Structures are given as C-alpha cells and as structure tokens.
Amino acid sequence: MKRMMREVHLPRRLRSVVWFMETLRIKPRPPFSFERTVRRLFHLQKSGYFVRKGILYRTLRAKGRPFVVEIGWQAPFLQFRIHQAVTPEERRELKEQLRRMFSADVDLIPFYRRAEQDELLAPVVRKRKGLRPVLDPTLYECLIKTIISQQLNLAFAGTLIDRLMQLAGERVEFDGESVCVFPTPDRVAALSYEDLTRLKFSRRKAEYVIDISRMVAEGALDLEGLRRRSDEEVMETLLPLRGIGRWTVECLLLFGMGRPDLLPAADIGLRRAVQKVYGLAKRPGEEEVRRIGEAWAPWRSYATFYLWDAITGG
DNA sequence: ATCCAGGCTCCTG
DNA sequence: CAGGAGCATGGA
C-alpha cells in the first residue's frame, strides 16, 4: 500500500503507466463549462467533496464499496481518476453515477432560448454559459442533506452533514489519510436521536433524519424507485412524511433527479436572487416568485440554479 | 447584542 | 385554517 501511494506522486508523464490508476472519461454535451460547474464544489469542500493540492475529489460508493474519485477536465472530456483497483462492475456503476451527477447529457440550448425571452434573466444566464447543476449520487444522500439544510445557513448545514459523515460514514484510505463516504441508510438507522443531538442537530431534525433512514433501511420507503414516477407522484409520496415539506421534495427532484422544471419558491436564496436580479424593493414572497418563474417554464430548475449561482459568490 | 440562515411541525385563537 | 413560536448554532 505504501508503495502504491508513493507511485501516485511520480511525474505526470509516468502516471499513465501506474496500473491501479483507473481513468474514466465522459464527453459531456456542449456547451459544458468545467470551471463554472465545479467552482462551488471547490468553495464548498464539504459534504463529500474535498480539495488536496488544488485538485478536487469526491467520495462515492459503487457496489457497496467506498471510493475516492479525482475530478478533472481534459477537453472535451470530464476525466475521473480512481486511485484504487476497480472491478468492471464497479467501474460501470461509477461511470453511470458520474455521468448523471454532472448532468452530462442535458441539452442546454432549449433552456438558453427560453432564458433569452426574459430580459432580466437573460444576462445572468448568458454570463454562465455551460454551467450545469451537479447532482447527488443517490436520492437518499440528497434527501438527508436537504433535510439537514432546512432553515440553516449553508456553512452550518455543511458542518452538520460532515459530522454525520464522520460519525456514520465508512472510511476509505486516501493518500495516507482516512476520508468518509456518505453513510448508507442502515448505518444512520442504527443511530439514536441522542447521537445526532450531540452533533448539535435539533431534536426534531435528529428525529426526521433517523426516522426516514429507518424507513429506507427497512424497505418501507423505496427512494430510488421514485425515479420512475412523475414530479407530482413523488410529491404525493413524500409530503406526508414527517420532516419533508414542499421545498424539500422540490430540492430532491432538482438535486437528486435533475428534473428540469422545479421551482423551490420558498427558498430564501432564490427569493434573494429574484429580488436582486429583478430589482425589487423588497424580498418577494413565495407566490410572487412562482408568478415570475412562470416565464422560465419548462426550465424552472435551471433558472433557479443559475440564479443561485448569481448570489453565491458568482 | 440581535437577527437571520437554501423550512417544518405543532400549537394557539 | 391562518398565524406564529420554536428550533440549534454561528456569522454578520
């Protein structure tokens, strides 16, 4: 193992001969801007993403086994490197996950045409050509992260997510340190509420996270099966669950499934962005955001995502 | 110090 | 059924 880690630091021209350095290449549909798409992930450095020596990494799971994936760009390819030996089945699953996560097959042109018809949205979108939403690898991970993020500022939410990963996620060796992968439902289901309140989750939120994890672990809730259902059916299925409101389902459809036409109108970030871009005197309410957002259909998710990008350091 | 964060539940009148 | 308190912490 020690020898393998040392070889990773060989000069670049020699790296390609290192047998265990598996490389996956995905050609995203143009236009694709790697810089714009990963910028927020670099900045985040939480929730499964981390940066070492200026390179972005993500922990993922394939066939139940945790991996660290290096994320890079070799035009016109997204290039992923795995510093571990990988079976063909694991390789296939990782590639499939990454293709979906980076929205690599989405045709942005119809969205850009739509955005041009809203003169206030158009410049925001034009400036971000090639930006794509980066999805979570599983619906479970997305749902739990979204619940944790309810009402909290992004920094604190990220801290709580990291603490949950440290507590319950499996570890994987990377370059001499041990990093965490997002825990599976059964590992979170095995926790007690007190385990999470100790991490400074509110009592309520600890209950939501663990109760939902138990439902998934016991098979009472089939999240991945929801991919085959319509937006409305997903909403109907999840809304009755304690801790899940409309905003949470909208975020799951958007960041979990990459559905193109969701509008999380209650979202404070979106409301701030709409206020700024549309020059409103005061912060718009949910209904006003929905009214303005009608002009973006059927691309409201993408408009939302681009507007978020416009107020978070963009 | 006070207010607010990528909401939701639950209680009150 | 509309409205509002409470949540847990940290940064502005």
Image (spheres, coloured by chain):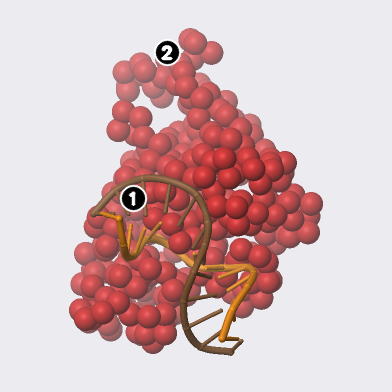
Chain colours: A red, B orange, C brown
Query: Disc 2 marks which amino acid?
Result: Arg
How many marks overall? 2
Is label 2 in a helix, a strand or a loop? helix
Q: Residues within 10 Å of mark 2 (few under 14, many from 20)?
A: few
> Residue A73: image x %, image y %?
34, 42
Q: Residues within 10 Å of mark 1 (few under 14, many from 20)?
A: some
Q: Taking A158 as reference, is A184 left or right?
A: right
Residue visible at 55% across and 73% down in the picture: A246
Q: Quadrant of residue A234?
A: bottom right
Query: Disc 1 marks which amino acid?
Result: Arg
Q: Is residue B9 or residue A287 the one in the foreground?
A: B9
Residue A39 is at least partly visible in this image: yes
Residue visible at 58% across and 55% down in the picture: A205
Residue identified by numbered label 1: A40
Residue identified by numbered label 2: A6
Relative height, residue A199 to residue A273 (above, below): above
Residue visible at 73% across and 51% down in the picture: A214
Query: Does mark 1 fall on the same chain as mark 2?
Result: yes
Label 2 to label 1: alpha-carbon separation: 30 Å
Q: Is residue A49 or residue A259 the one in the foreground?
A: A49
Question: Label 1: chain?
Answer: A
Is label 1 in a helix, a strand or a loop? helix
> Residue A142: image x %, image y %?
55, 55
- Of tags 2 and 1, the one toward the viewer is 1
> Residue A283: image x %, image y %?
30, 77
Relative height, residue A291 to residue A154 (above, below): below
Residue A17 is at least partly visible in this image: no
